[in-house]
Amino acid sequence: MKIKILKFSIHSAKLAGKIIREGGVIVFPTDTVYGIGCDPFNDKSVKRVYEIKRRSGKPMPILAKDLNDIKKIAEMNEVEFKIASKLWPGQLTILLNAKPSFRSSRLVSEDGMVGVGRPAWFKTLIIIEESGGLLVGTSANISGLSPPQSIQELNEEILNSVDLVIDGGRCLTGKPSTVIKLVNDDRLKILRLGSITIERLKEVCEELDLTLDIESRYPLKD
């Protein structure tokens, strides 16, 4: 089957949303790199994304249109809300406690955490909105390989495995999102350094009186 590749438009975003709601899988632009998306509540679709990426049990992040959508899958305390208010919308994934009703999802880690992002790019937000407000947003690459910043960089195996590709042009940064986790309400831990810099995270920690936990290595490949 010939893969349908469409330029981003309101029409193609609506088609992408329809495909997502019907259980399909798409490739779409984000403000970091191209992502593979599906309905996070559809277990068969989520399993398919894992298979396309050749990814094992490591949970995948979910992109949300707004905070009300995040409440459907995760809980956020006051400190996490303050962090999010300073860095969202933007190129950041925060690990949050999954809601009890969502904890059976394979997108949730063994300790009950789910990675959530709130993108800034209008193209991504429109696609998420048309998909119902939440969209799996893992990078569109075979696990361990570099994530693509443009359609031209997409792996052919990925292209042949999805239902629709939305070409939104070159993504804004080319780096995956920075991933963080709040520990004991007073320590911000960097799990992956990406588009948001250590300097910016230091500023936020100083403003909120948090300790920044800086590790020696930060994997960029997802």
Image (cartoon, rainbow, N blue to C red):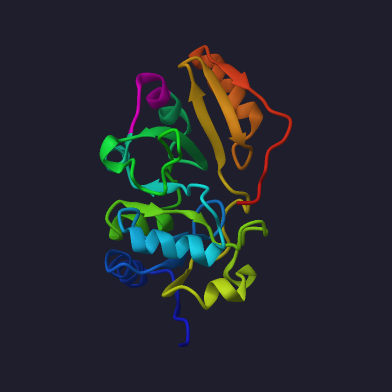
Who's the residue at 60% across and 20% down the image?
212
Who's the residue at 57% across and 53% down the image?
172
On screen, residue 131 versus residue 30, left or right, reads left
Who's the residue at 37% across and 63% down the image?
45
Q: Residue furthest right?
A: 216
Question: Looking at the image, which is closer to me, 108 or 120?
Answer: 108
Q: Residue furthest top?
A: 209
Who's the residue at 56% across and 56% down the image?
33
The verdict on residue 178 being magenta is no
**Residue range of the region highlighted in magenta in the rendering:** 75-82
Using the image, determine if residue 219 lies above or below residue 154. Answer: above
Please identify the quarter of the rendering in which residue 201 is found.
top right
Q: Give the x, y percent position of residue 10.
A: 33, 67
Please identify the quarter of the rendering in which residue 216 is found.
top right
Q: Give the x, y percent position of residue 57.
A: 51, 50
Q: Main secondary structure of the magenta part?
A: helix
On screen, residue 213 versus residue 75, left or right, reads right
Please identify the quarter of the rendering in which residue 164 is found.
bottom left
On screen, residue 105 versus residue 220, left or right, reads left
Question: Looking at the image, which is closer to me, 124 or 102?
Answer: 102
Q: Give the x, y percent position of residue 215.
A: 69, 28
Count all numbered tags in the image, as a single digit: 0
Using the image, determine if residue 96 lies above or below residue 154. Answer: above
Q: Give the x, y percent position of residue 103.
A: 33, 40
Quadrant holding the N terminus:
bottom left
